[in-house]
Amino acid sequence: MTEQPQKIVALVDGSVYSASLCEHAAWISQRTEAPVELIHVLGRREAPEKRDLSGSIALGARSALLQELADIDAQRAKLISHRGRAILEDARAILDKAGVNEITTRLRQGDIVEAIGEIEEDARVIMIGKRGEDADLAKGHLGSNLERIIRASHKPVFVASRAFKPISKVLVAYDGGTSAMKAVDHILRSPLFQGLTVHVVTVGTATAEVKKGLADAKALLKAAGLDAETSVLPGQPETALGKMVDEAGFDMLVMGAYGHSRIRTLIIGSTTTAMIRSCKVPVVLLR
């Protein structure tokens, strides 16, 4: 999400989060005029198994059975590939219906983090669902690739919630660290946030330094024409932020991926899962 017309990269996996992910991608595209690239990655576990079973096959039947095993593997690989393309076409249909004009699709094989490393240079944002296909019924768990992508990506990561709704109120977690200041700078420069209400909040004690940091952030956002407010919340970040999102009706949470205070733990340790899991709205993480 920079000023350049870089593409929105949406990672779709066929989970119940894919539809919401595509609707959020369409919303971002319409506000930024950026093209969307839909990517489905066939993980290594989905690749045909390379097993040598010849040692357990009687000599007379070996050739026929090995050929049959090879045919089964080839058929399985073909079905997995067809399924991946069907997932991409379903995702494209959602974007088409939403009026997105420029859409590309890509089916890749291998590790998803390696795939991100190869494509993120041209991306303005990496989008992923909160949970993957295997975690649809496991509400206490996040997608296995989510934290890996957050740690590896140098671009903003948009974590889509299960349900889409238009975004008008944005909560920004601000701790005065480099990532938090970059998040504010990103917001004031991006057309995505124009016309939205932005509320910048620090969790902790309202010291003179905290108040000055918030005042500076508000001034920058106001100068960019944004409707901005600030506040200080007592309590623990992982619970206070989620509670504020729910009670004040925010539609999205934006936060720096790294900081110099306890908010840093939201991306380093187990609090990452607690924070993203507790928020029922999309979370955007910036380095």
Image: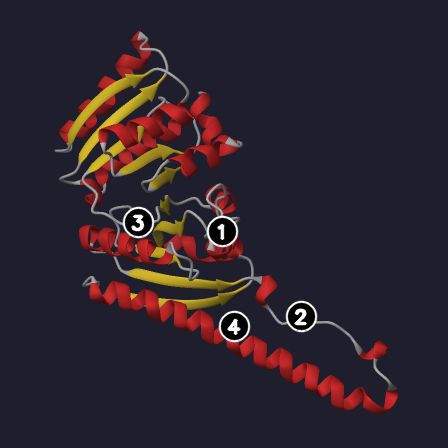
Contact check, label 4 and label 1, Cβ < 8 Å: no
Residue wearing tag 2: 49
Which one is earlier in the sequence, the residue at label 3 or at label 4?
4
Q: Percent position (x, y) of residue 164? A: 27, 50
Q: Quadrant of the C terminus?
A: top left
Extreme residue in the top direction: 208
Query: Residue 135 bears which disc, if any?
Result: 1
Residue wearing tag 3: 163
Q: Is residue 70 left or right of residue 130?
A: right
Which one is earlier in the sequence, the residue at label 3 or at label 1?
1
Q: Three-letter amino acid code at disc 4?
A: Ile
Query: Residue 84 bears which disc, if any?
Result: none
Query: Residue 80 bears which disc, if any?
Result: 4
Q: Percent position (x, y) of residue 180? A: 35, 28
Disc 1 on helix, strand or loop?
helix
Number of the front mark, 4 or 1: 1
Q: Three-letter amino acid code at disc 1?
A: Ala
Q: Percent position (x, y) of residue 277? A: 42, 38
